[in-house]
Image (cartoon, grey):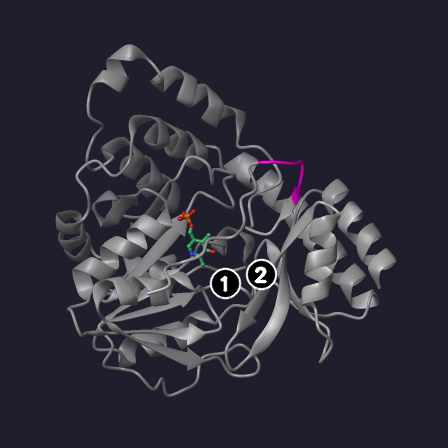
Amino acid sequence: MPGYTPGEQPREGEFIKLNTNENPYPPSPRVLEAIRAAANGEQLRKYPDPLGTTFRRTAGRMLGIDPDGILIGNGSDDILTIVTRACVPEGGVMASPSPSYLLYRTLAELQGANFRAVPFTAAWQLPEPWPVCEAHLTLVPNPNSPSGTTVSLPCLERLAGQLSGTLVLDEAYVDFAEANGLHLAAVGGKNILITRSLSKSYSLAGVRFGFAVGEPALVRELVKVKDSYNCDVLSLAAATAALEDQQYLRTTRTRILATRARLTGALERLGFAVTPSQANFVWCRRGDRPVKPLYEELKKRMILIRYMHYEGYGDGLRISVGSDAEIDRLLEELVRLL
Ligand SMILES: *Cc1c(COP(=O)(O)O)cnc(C)c1O
């Protein structure tokens, strides 16, 4: 198997990084304080709380949900691995719409499962009826990557009703969207699991923390599969402090949404077809004209964006919403190149 290829993370050179959807703003100052306070000999000497009880209480309070319905993870990718191991037998079936997050196929390959990619409609919606109802696990990123589009909650509810297996709503980008599916998982959604990441909206990609929300009975089964100590004391402290500072999240979110609108307009004026985004990145194409050379030329100019090619769909560029200064630099170079 080829294995999953993560986005480029250059260790050398001063790149403007707009390729893996990191937040351009630093995490809340309260996160740094919490990490400093947790970094003492006594706490580092001992194993962390396997269930992350303090984090779960805080998250339960902030989100208005039962802490027993929360699972902690070493990034939401860890959660996706746990769910796959728990729900999918060898030779089982996993499905997701396509184009979407490429990791899902790799998880299926690791599990010895069959992966079914179901094309999105031209408007980035799910086909109804959904064609793979027998899958053990169905994964839908909402907002989707690379498109930044969303599927409506009634549509997701209808999908869950058709499936015999578990539905994961991967909400890695949901803090940048207008609506989220939390109530679908929290209110009687027996087969729905929501996954969240602190990497993007909370500016903590380097810390590695994510969590899932679902029925407590489902979460208890997932706990059996995870590494006992999958989250360390520093990430637990950081994640708890990050969730407590909702005011900070609102402030950075507002700035990112404003920059997203400006980036979208500017790209359209440069002749790109830009898909309206509910995430902290935009997906753009230039009709039939090739876009890979633009990615390559920008890289030479120390600006990294993501060039993506999907079989049966074609290619495009995914550009993270950076700071205003970073986006100005990008647009300057694009004007020159075009
Ligand atoms: C970034 C991303 C993740 C992974 O987030 P981590 O918490 O950093 O592991 C999951 N799903 C999608 C769709 C993503 O883009």
Q: Amino acid at mark 2?
A: Gln
The residue at which mark 1 appears reads as 143
Rendered image quadrant of residue 232? top left
User: Disc 2 and disc 1: Cα gap in Å?
Assistant: 6 Å
Dominant secondary structure (helix, strand or loop) of the stretch shown in magenta: loop
Q: Which mark is residue 278?
A: 2
Compare residues 182 and 199 and report the one nearer the observer: 199
Residue pictured at 23% horizontal, 67% vertical: 191
Q: Which range is magenta?
A: 12-16
Residue pictured at 35% horizontal, 73% vertical: 157
Q: Ligand 1: does it lie within 8 Å of the C-beta at label 2? A: no
106 to the left or right of 52: right
313 to the left or right of 79: right
Compare residues 4 and 195 and report the one nearer the observer: 4
Residue pictured at 20% horizontal, 30% vertical: 49
Compare residues 316 and 213 and report the one nearer the observer: 316
Secondary structure beneath label 1? loop
Query: In the image, residue 64 lies at what x, y percent?
Result: 34, 46
